[in-house]
């Protein structure tokens, strides 16, 4: 397909005698958002590292039709001794774009703060701004909200969803939280235990307004997914 | 207040032991020592000697930083360089001062070069290994982040490696500044032409033990004062930059 941004065929990865990923096949189109849910140690983060070229030792075929990657790490990975702004200009020289995303993420006025002077939620927002500032074709999110409380988590998700109206990019997210996955994804991939396989590819046909965690449609999908996940 | 009390206890203990021992050639009383110190305080030779020791120490400090840190940095950043340099530096570290002494007297005779070279060679390995350890302990997650965003190697070195090195640079300087006085005074004693070590050597020849103690007090005061000043300045900088020490 012309707008396929990522195609993975028979991806396998092991760490010595320990097989982790066992023949994944998936395709991601431009603008598409997928979330991956699976047990710990099933190779989710390893897969993201493979996509971001941080891990090159694997078998199978990966076709990438993108150039720029934005990676939102689980921990903010901000350089502690330089300001928020300098952390952002470390990866992108486009200050105008950085200021746009800082405003969109409600971080205006915190440019000169050091990472230690802002809250955990704000650090994750900076982590996200850094990923967006490089003008990514694909945004990779590695359990980015794991350490955040619910209101902060969903306000960031809301910000990401509203940003996608202005700037188009594909998203791959891994999470343990079904609510997060439904709030953000067009498809949810459910993974088995290690050595993992993609055992379900669930389409989330929800309008943006139905992605509210209290909507009936949301709760219905959540319960279907819960059943599938608990049956692994 | 507690420090003053500690000093007072030390002086009392010194006085008591000197009375019990009653051998001024081994342990003169605090009174004799401070009397000698007051004589030293009015002699211009003392200030010339202090100045001579201070500039040699500062020169050694600068040389050790200028040479040791770049080598340590390269060793930290590259495993092959580390393995190539490590044996030679370990040997330099293990060589006793007396061996360097024989060598420098043979090459330069008595003068300022000997103490400087001995001080430099004695402290260089500390600087190299501390810097290498600092670079090797750089947060690998930050390096990985920079690789994802395809940040240039030069920018990674400047921002991440050098930034994470700062606490190590400071602690290296703290360690070196504490040791450099001792090394320089010993080297001056053995092969110097001027400095506190030379005054101690002369005092030994005249069997003027209180003077040896008084000169030792000057050296200790220089060491502690410089170490304290450097520590305070670095703590302030680290606090300002929010870097954990």
Image (cartoon, coloured by chain):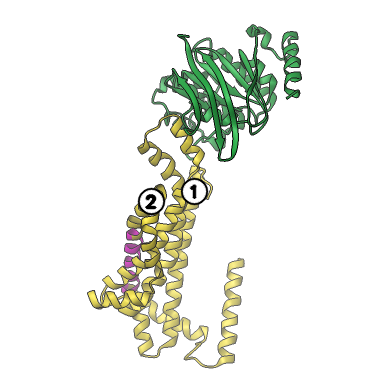
Chain colours: A green, B yellow
Q: Is residue B49 magenta?
A: yes
Front-most of residues B112 and A36: A36
Location of mark 1 (residue)? B137
- What percent of the width, then of the height, locates residue A226? 75, 20
**Label 1 lies in what chain?**
B
Which mark is in front, 1 or 2? Answer: 2
Classify the position of the C terminus of chain A by image quarter: top right
Q: Report the magenta residues as a range.
A: B48-63
Mark 1–mark 2 CB contact (< 8 Å): no
Residue B100, label in figure: none
Front-most of residues B119 and A57: A57
Q: Is residue B86 magenta?
A: no
**Up-down: is B241 above or below A71?**
below
Taking the image as drawn, is residue B196 in sight? Answer: no
Label 1: how many residues lie within 10 Å, few (<14), some (14-19) or many (20+)? few
At x 37% / y 34%, what residue is drawn?
B152
Mark before the other along the chain sequence, 1 or 2: 2
- What percent of the width, then of the height, locates residue B104? 27, 74
Q: Quadrant of residue A154?
A: top right
**Up-down: is A168 above or below B63?**
above
Q: Residue furthest bottom?
A: B22
Front-most of residues B173 and A139: A139
Location of mark 2 (residue)? B80
């Amino acid at each position: 397909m012309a707008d396929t941004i990522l195609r993975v065929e028979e991806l396998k990865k092991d760490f010595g005698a320990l097989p982790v990923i066992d023949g994944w096949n998936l395709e991601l189109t431009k603008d598409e958002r997928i979330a991956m849910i699976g047990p710990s140690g099933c190779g989710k983060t390893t897969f993201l590292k493979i996509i971001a070229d941080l891990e090159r030792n694997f078998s199978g075929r990966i076709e990438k039709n993108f150039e720029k990657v934005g990676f939102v790490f689980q921990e903010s990975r901000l350089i502690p001794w330089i300001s928020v702004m300098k952390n952002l200009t470390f990866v992108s020289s486009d200050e105008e774009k950085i200021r746009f995303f800082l405003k969109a993420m409600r971080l205006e006025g915190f440019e000169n703060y050091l990472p230690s002077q802002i809250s955990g939620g704000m650090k994750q927002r900076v982590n996200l701004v850094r990923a967006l500032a490089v003008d990514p074709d694909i945004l990779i999110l590695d359990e980015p909200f794991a350490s955040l409380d619910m209101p902060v988590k969903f306000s960031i998700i809301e910000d990401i969803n509203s940003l996608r109206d202005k700037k188009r990019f594909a998203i791959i997210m891994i999470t343990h939280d079904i609510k997060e996955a439904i709030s953000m994804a067009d498809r949810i991939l459910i993974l088995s235990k290690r050595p993992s396989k993609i055992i379900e590819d669930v389409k989330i046909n929800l309008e943006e307004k139905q992605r509210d965690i209290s909507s009936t449609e949301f709760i219905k999908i959540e319960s279907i997914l819960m059943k599938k996940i608990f049956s692994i | 207040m507690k420090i003053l009390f500690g000093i007072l206890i030390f002086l009392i203990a010194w006085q008591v032991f000197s009375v019990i021992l009653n051998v001024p050639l081994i342990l003169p009383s605090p009174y004799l020592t401070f009397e000698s110190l007051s004589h030293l305080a009015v002699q211009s030779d003392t200030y010339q000697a202090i100045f001579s020791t201070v500039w040699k120490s500062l020169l050694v400090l600068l040389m050790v930083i200028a040479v040791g840190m770049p080598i340590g940095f390269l060793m930290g950043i590259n495993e092959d360089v580390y393995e190539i340099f490590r044996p030679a530096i370990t040997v330099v570290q293990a060589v006793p001062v007396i061996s360097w002494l024989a060598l420098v007297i043979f090459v330069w005779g008595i003068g300022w070069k000997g103490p400087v070279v001995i001080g430099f060679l004695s402290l260089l390995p500390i600087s190299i290994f501390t810097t290498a350890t600092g670079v090797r302990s750089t947060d690998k997650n930050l390096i990985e982040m920079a690789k994802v965003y395809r940040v240039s190697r030069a920018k990674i070195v400047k921002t991440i490696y050098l930034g994470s090195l700062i606490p190590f640079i400071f602690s290296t300087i703290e360690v070196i500044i504490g040791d450099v006085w001792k090394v320089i005074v010993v080297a001056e004693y053995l092969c110097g032409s001027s400095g506190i070590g030379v005054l101690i050597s002369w005092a030994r020849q005249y069997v003027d033990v209180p003077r040896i103690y008084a000169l030792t007090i000057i050296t200790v005061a220089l060491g502690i004062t410089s170490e304290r000043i450097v520590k305070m300045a670095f703590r302030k900088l680290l606090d300002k930059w929010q870097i954990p020490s």
